[in-house]
Amino acid sequence: MDLSDRAVGIREGEELDVQKVGEFLKDSISGLSGDLVVEQFPSGFSNLTYLIRVGHREMVLRRPPFGRKAKSAHDMGREYRILSALDGVYPYTPTPLLYTEDAGVMGCPFYVMERIPGIILRKELPRGLDLTPGQGRALCHRLMDVLCELHAIDYKAVGLHDFGKPEGYVRRQVEGWSERYRQARTPDAPTFESFMKWLAERIPGESSRYSVIHNDYKFDNVVLSLQDPLKIIGVLDWEMATIGDPLMDLGCSLAYWVHPSDSPGVQAASMMVTHMPGLLTRREMVERYALTSGLALTLEDFEFYYCFGIFRVAVILQQIYYRYYHGQTRDKRFAMLIFSSHIIDEELRKQIPGLE
């Protein structure tokens, strides 16, 4: 049974000019011959991801979404740069092939990379894949270990010294994501004002721990081997990567980590398969990260980072919902995102007693 992640037909309004794209790719990448076939990966709410087949070769094309976009988001050149810097250093990045800002091809910058065929875990396990509790636990360990490998890279040595501004990173994140939410809020969305005030008052002191951070590290952004599903062979979706505090990366990762004991609303909104028997709890994930990284860290120390991560999920979903609310996208999946924002608002109020 083929367990590999599959592309499907292209959503209405997100079509590419196959002739233009095909001509450009054949002129830019040596050895391409044959008819070009374009499909779309159906998951993901941000940058659009297409499967490109030319003969027997498979590649992946990434471009920004249609409609209004956050000012600092969807920088294709930045995403291509970090893939290029980590190529050969971090063995999980797809090989980048080309980047262009030629608006004549599709009206926006885009890049192309090699495809990493494999298994991607989403809300449920792919049909035909069964993991025992012991295997699930081992996979969680590997997930944290691969993240620690990223955080251990000397970002200056790979030419990323100017890729971000690590000093003051946490404060800029709190202030920036708060402002993004205010800009994207629609009349039917919660305000989050009391929580944003809570965050601003609890920003930790300046850290000396700076590293490459992925900023969207979770199950559906890692690729598992078809031969050994406990082996991670790829890490995808680098659009929010930067240089900053690795604990912010961990907090944003665990914001997606839903327990079977979490509220029904949270479980219904879950986008990950983290409810499987045997998978680590959030506390155990933090403990594994601390063990592998060598950092002294407890879940209680981690409250700020985890709560920020939950809030950031709400902002990302609201930015996407904003485009749907204002008719800038026809993707009907986005209509339900407003309910996730309200669920997150309720959960933060449970997590932090006393929020207004």
Image (cartoon, grey):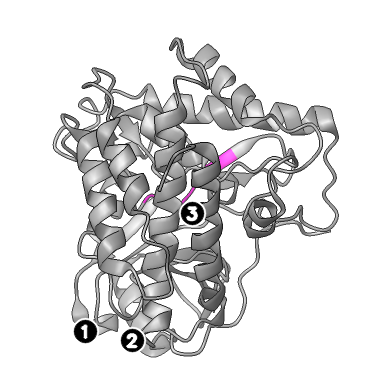
Compared to residue 49, the image places residue 195 above or below, namely above
Q: Position of residue 77 (x, y in %)?
A: 23, 58
- Looking at the image, is mark 2 or mark 1 earlier in the sequence? 2
Q: In the image, which is nearer the foreground, mark 2 or mark 1?
A: 1
Is 303 left or right of 100, judged from the image as shown? right
Q: How many residues crowd mark 1 within 10 Å: few (<14), some (14–19), many (20+)?
A: few
| Disc 3 to disc 1: CB gap under 8 Å | no
Residues 152 and 258: in front is: 258
Is 214 left or right of 143, judged from the image as shown? left
Residue placed under numbered mark 3 in the picture: 345
- Looking at the image, is mark 2 or mark 3 earlier in the sequence? 2
Is 136 included in the stretch rendered in magenta?
no
Q: Residue at x 44, y 89 (%)?
A: 13
| Disc 2 to disc 1: CB gap under 8 Å | yes
Q: Position of residue 58 (x, y in %)?
A: 53, 65
Instruction: Determine the CA span between mark 2 and mark 3.
Output: 45 Å
- Looking at the image, is mark 3 or mark 1 earlier in the sequence? 1
- Amino acid bearing label 3: Asp
Is 291 left or right of 161, judged from the image as shown? right
Q: Position of residue 74 (x, y in %)?
A: 29, 63
Compared to residue 56, the image places residue 293 above or below, namely above
Can residue 237 be seen?
no
Q: In the rendered image, which quarter is residue 67 located in?
A: bottom left
Q: Residue at x 51, y 64 (%)?
A: 44
